[in-house]
Image: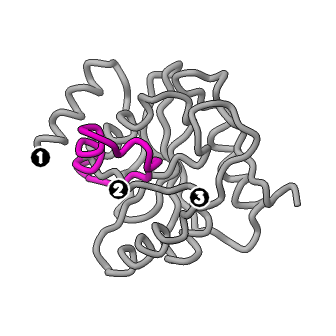
Amino acid sequence: MMRKGLARTVVRLMGYKMVGEVPQTGILVGAPHTSNWDFITMLLVMWHGGEHPRVLVKKQLFKGPLGWVLKAFGGVPLDRDNASTVVKDLVAEAGTGKPFRLIIAAEGTRGKGEYWKSGFLRLSKETGLPITLAFFDPPTKRMGFGPTFHASDDVGADMDIVREFFADKHGIRPQNATEPRLREESA
C-alpha cells in the first residue's frame, strides 16, 4: 500500500497522467528504453496500480548494495549469455497459477541498437501469458499501458502491433530508441 501511495504522489508531482488498465497477469514490454530512469518509471507505472512486478535486469548490476535494492524492487538478474536458465525459472513461476507480472525492456539496452530481443514473444508462447505494452512518454506527460495480446505464430503481425503502439512514444532520450523490429523478421 505504501508503494501505491508513493507512486501516485510522484506521478502527480511530475505532472504525468496514467492511462490504460493494470494487467492482472502477463509479460509487460516497457519501451522506449532510453535511460537508466526507465527501471524507476516502469515501477511507478506498476506501483501506481498497486502491483509489484518482476523486472529483468542485466546481472552485472546486482553487485554490492545496488543488487540488494534491485532484488527488493523485484529485479531478476539476467545473464544475457545464458538466459535459458532464467527463462526456465520464470516459465515455472508463471505456471504456478499465482498472478505473474514480468517487465521486460525488449530493446535490451539504453542505447540505440539494431534489433529488439524476442524473449518476450517466446515467454508469452511458452507460458500462454498475454503481452501488455507499457510506456513512459515525457513529451506528452503520459505513462501507463497500451494493448494486450497473445504471441502468435506470425512474428511480423505481432511486431506490427508493437510498432503501431510505440510509433508515437519517445522515452527520456528519444535519440537512443531502437526501432521495434526483431532479427527473426529479417531472416
Disc 2 or 1, which lies upstream in sequence?
Answer: 1
The residue that label 2 is drawn on is 54
What segment is highlighted magenta in the picture? 49-72
- Find residue 82 and report its horizontal and vertical position in percent: 55, 64
Q: Nearer the viewer, residue 35 or 171?
A: 35
Q: CA distance from mark 2 to mark 3?
A: 20 Å
The answer to whether residue 54 is magenta is: yes
Q: Is residue 158 left or right of residue 130?
A: right
Can you name the residue that lies furthest to the front here? 64
Nearer the observer, 159 or 15: 159
Query: Circle 3: is it few (<14), some (14-19), or many (20+) Cα within 10 Å?
Result: few
| Residue 183 horizontal side relative to residue 98, left or right | right
Q: Is residue 32 above or below residue 171?
A: below
Q: Position of residue 55 (x, y in %)?
A: 39, 51
Name the residue that disc number 1 marks: 1
Q: Element at badge 1? A: loop
The quarter of the picture where the C terminus appears is bottom right
Residue type highlighted by circle 3: Asp
Write down the quadrant of residue 177 in the picture: top right
Q: Which residue is mark 3?
A: 81
Instruction: Please determine whether, in this image, residue 13 is positioned above or below residue 152.
Output: above
